[in-house]
Amino acid sequence: MANPAAAAAPEQSAKAKKYPYYIEKPLEEGRVKQFLDIFAAILRHSNYKPLLDIYSRVVTRCARCAGGCQIYQATGDPEDIPCYRSNLLLGVYRRHFTLGGWLRGRILGDPGLQESTIDEMLDAFYHCTGCRRCNLECPMGLDHGLVMRLARNILSEMGIVPKALLVSVREQLQGKTANTSAIPAPAMMDTCEFLEEELADLTGQKIHFPIDREDVEYVFFPAVSDYLLEPDTLMGNAAVLYAAGDQDNWTIGTKYFDGINYGLFYNDAILGRIVEKEIAEVRRLRGKKILIGECGHASRSAKAFVPTFNGGEAIPVVSIQEYTFNALEQGKITLDPNAVTETVTYHDPCNLARSGWIVEQPRKILKSFVKNFVEMEPHGAENYCCGGGGGTVSLDEVHDYRMKVVGKIKAEQMRATGAEIIVAPCANCKKQLKELVDYYKIPATVVGLHDLILRAIRFPEKNGAATSEETYEAGEIKENSPVSV
Amino acid sequence: MHDMLQFARGPLFRLAFLVMALGLLRLVILALWGIGQMIYRARDHNNPYSKIVKTTLTWLIPIQRLHRIRPWLSYSSFLFHMGLIVTPIFLLDHIHLWRASIGISWPGIPKTAADALTLLVLAAGILLIGIRIFNPYTRRVSGFMDYFLVLLILFIFSTGFIASRPYNPIPYETSMLIHVLSADLILLLAPFTKIAHCVLFPLVRMTSELAWKFPPEAGKDAAIQVHGEVKPI
Ligand code: SF4
Ligand code: SF4
């Protein structure tokens, strides 16, 4: 980790970017054949071929998408235009996997994929955050988020993955602790106990973190890093579940308790294996639903891909924000409208908001107890990424890139609101925004949604949370509408 | 000259039109086949069709989207397309040709309207090319065809325009021949270039959405095909 530049540099083309990644495996020769073999295998088994077919036919190269991408807007470098980036891969597809492209290549003497193209792709695709904002501006409807995933998928099968992502996933899928932060289950339970004591001091209520309880409604998977970094978020989560009467109706499993899924960022096989771990844990505990904590990509990877890997009768997935919103709508929780007097703004995590899935719910929750709520512009489905999307937030070696380039617009947006509190319901966004606030010296604090709820939540006089029976009928959540997330 | 013109707008035109129609039809069938394959391979069939239709329609007539970013590019492109679709189909001279050759016809637009639209296409097209050349980042993503196709269209419209003037500097038949030949060329090119978006457009967003519904075993199967096993991480 010490010298990222040195690790990635030897094979990099002359034009190596300013912000290289640390790659565990040294880059080898013979990558062109490897790349094409893997590309071919993926095209054969996946659904990407029809996608690339139509994309490579209609792409009009109008560069309108440039206006949507925050990377391009910060650098002004034509190579950061989404379409340029995607064309790196579309070009390889055309040249090596279509008859027309092959013929044209033959006639024009285009040799096709080169080692240097692979270097360029490594830079281009791991620098994109996959926020899919550019998709909003493409008249043709190209989704560069998908192209980016495919490119990373190919690269990752060659062993080209930023090391921090790889190491986390290795621990999650093969390690003893089975989570990305390598927290042993006993340590997680200790943390929960400690949080219970904190909650008792704070609220005077006996709020529990139920461990390994069977036959419950909700099995809870937060971004596991919350156990280390975001105790207030977790306490807020538990407090809401308690106040809404689901105290005995949720649980944390000791065999698997991590919501993080970096597979969403770079590899289909890994995405599936992680989703399957969640499913297996819910099955082990005979739970009914997957409850995801405050985390954008954790929520989306479960919401969108549990049905993919679990089939038609998939386990329903609920995000804690949907849960809290429903509890509030049904009058099950009370939030003190005078609790928060500071100016508050809300950052939309791309993975929650781009599809319009979770946009209004958190705002309604916030507006119910925050006096001074302001919006960033643009927001909602058209938000700007925090600048740490696509897994880049976990890569320390590109801290400067996240601050100076991708996060630049976000910093300006945050400052422009004048908000004292910035709410970001996502472990990744929170980390990135906190760093941005530091870096740009913005006078604001970044917190999770439930951190703030914890400040505002009020409990009935007697220690009378509703019983489980009552909640079963009242607590139904609509989760089976068609998803596009 | 007369014979050549007859040939260009008779058999050659018919051939070009046939190539275009069959070529585009092939692309649509391939795209639909692809979509069918995607649905068949996916395990999750809960697709957001209404959202797909809605966004596709929004972009079919993207009036509310144009001013948001790159307004010059967006407006000129929009007007360019409008003129490009309306003029050739509703020009009275073209309708006469259709009636003469296959006996069907439809109401046309007045000549002055057609002239105005032609000038609009020319102006918008020149602006589009200008943006491509002078805007450094659009230039970076552009390839030969991106210029060539617009130039070809401008050429077709301007020769058509000149040919139909009473004070034509070039002999009528010559300008008409150039007009028809270049029009034939663009029809021939349509299925093999990005012009294909004229028929594929409605299917792109559908394909994008469906592509997110992965076949469950795809990642694993691809890894096994390459490495012979699912390798440890
Ligand atoms: S907006 Fe779409 S068609 Fe235009 S350059 Fe970008 S990706 Fe290509
Ligand atoms: S997905 Fe986001 S970061 Fe990537 S090219 Fe599109 S707008 Fe830029």
Image (spheres, coloured by chain):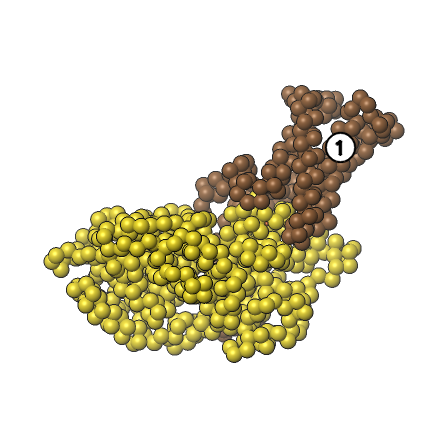
Which chain's colour is brown? B
Residue A25, given in percent of the width and then of the height, sits at: 56, 76
Counting from the top left corner in percent of width and height, residue A283 is at 33, 63
Q: Mark 1 lies on which chain?
A: B
Furthest-bottom residue in this view = A2
Q: Does the residue labelled 1 lie within 8 Å of ligand 1?
A: no
Judge left or right: residue A200 versus residue A190.
Answer: left
Question: What residue is drawn where x is 36% and y is 55%?
Answer: A419
Say few, some or many: other residues with alpha carbon within 10 Å of mark 1 (under 14 / 14 to 19 / 20 or more): some
Disc 1 marks which residue? B158
The hue in which chain A appears in the rendered picture of the protein? yellow
| Residue beneath the point at 69% across and 43% down | B130
Q: Where's residue A454, x and y in %?
A: 26, 60
Name the residue nearer the viewer: A388 or A296.
Answer: A388
Question: Disc 1 on helix, strand or loop?
Answer: helix
Determine whether, in the image, residue A309 is placed left or right of residue B183. left
